[in-house]
Amino acid sequence: MLLERIRRMRRARLCRRDQYVRDLERRRLIGELHDGVIQDLAGINYALERLRLGGVSADQHGEVIADSALRLRRSIGDLRTLLLDNYPPDLGDEGLGLALERLAETLECLGMEVRLEVSRTECLPPGTSTLIFRAAQEAVRNVARHSGAHEVLIRAGRRRGQATLLVEDDGQGFDRARLLERHEAGHFGLQSTSDLVTACGGVLRVRAAPGQGTSVNVEVPVG
């Protein structure tokens, strides 16, 4: 009787955690749309509306249309990337190491030198591998968008009962106050990822300073 009650309580706790994780993922997706595609589409709409109402001189019509078309193609590309981001690779078949290698390649395509160190990730449970990948994905996205880095380190593995991740760059860094301002303005980014890691019993730490790069460290217990 007592054992069955404990099992029911454990199932209920897992269901609540799963719902919480889904809510966090939904908030992250909303943040990505708000910060990117929605703002771009609003800008395109404003430019075309000015054109329709005669607020643009005749000799600038072609320029406005060409710029709007370019921004629209970029928005389509961003939406495709967002879809891929929310359907990560099959980590069960491909493994976390290969998924991280592909993330590293996105930075290399931007001209950054990336050092990838992966060890014992094949021992991680599927849910933990997905969580580490999500954290790495968000950290790499921030490096690509904001860091201006030349060198990046991505290290993942398992150590002393913990799944670990480190993403470190030598870029421009940032002020913690500015990060809080962005979060309060609705730019969720690493905060949503941190909430997701915390919901799974782990911790995400960010160390950064202007001109001194950024370090994102994740530890998640492996039960």
Image (cartoon, rainbow, N blue to C red):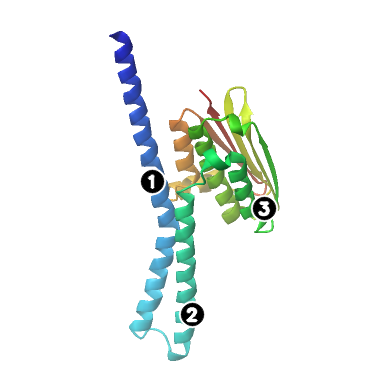
Residue positioned 45% across, 70% down in the render: 72
Q: Quadrant of residue 122?
A: top right
Residue hosting label 2? 66
- Give x and y (percent) for residue 161: 58, 23
First reached walking from the N terminus: tag 3 or tag 2: 2
Observer-side mark, 3 or 2, equals 2
Q: Which residue is mark 3?
A: 149
How many angstroms separate mark 3 from mark 1 (CA)?
28 Å
Q: How would you rate the neighbour count of disc 3 (Cα within 10 Å): few for under 14, some for 14-19, many for 20 or more?
A: many
Looking at numbered disc 2 in the image, what kind of residue is underneath it? Ala
Q: Tag 2's secondary structure?
A: helix
Asked if residue 4 shows in the view, the reply is yes
- Per the image, label 3 sits on a secondary structure element best described as loop
Q: Which residue is mark 1?
A: 27
| Residue occupying the far front of the picture | 93
Image point (33%, 15%), residue name: 6
Q: Amino acid at mark 1?
A: Arg
All told, the count of numbered labels is 3
Instruction: List x then y, in percent, for residue 194.
Output: 48, 38
* Marks 3 and 2, how far apart at CA: 31 Å
Tag on residue 43? none
Q: Is residue 105 above or below residue 166?
A: below
Q: Residue furthest top?
A: 1
- Residues 80 and 95: in front is 95
* Location of residue 222 in the rendering, given as x and y in whole percent from the top left corner: 53, 25
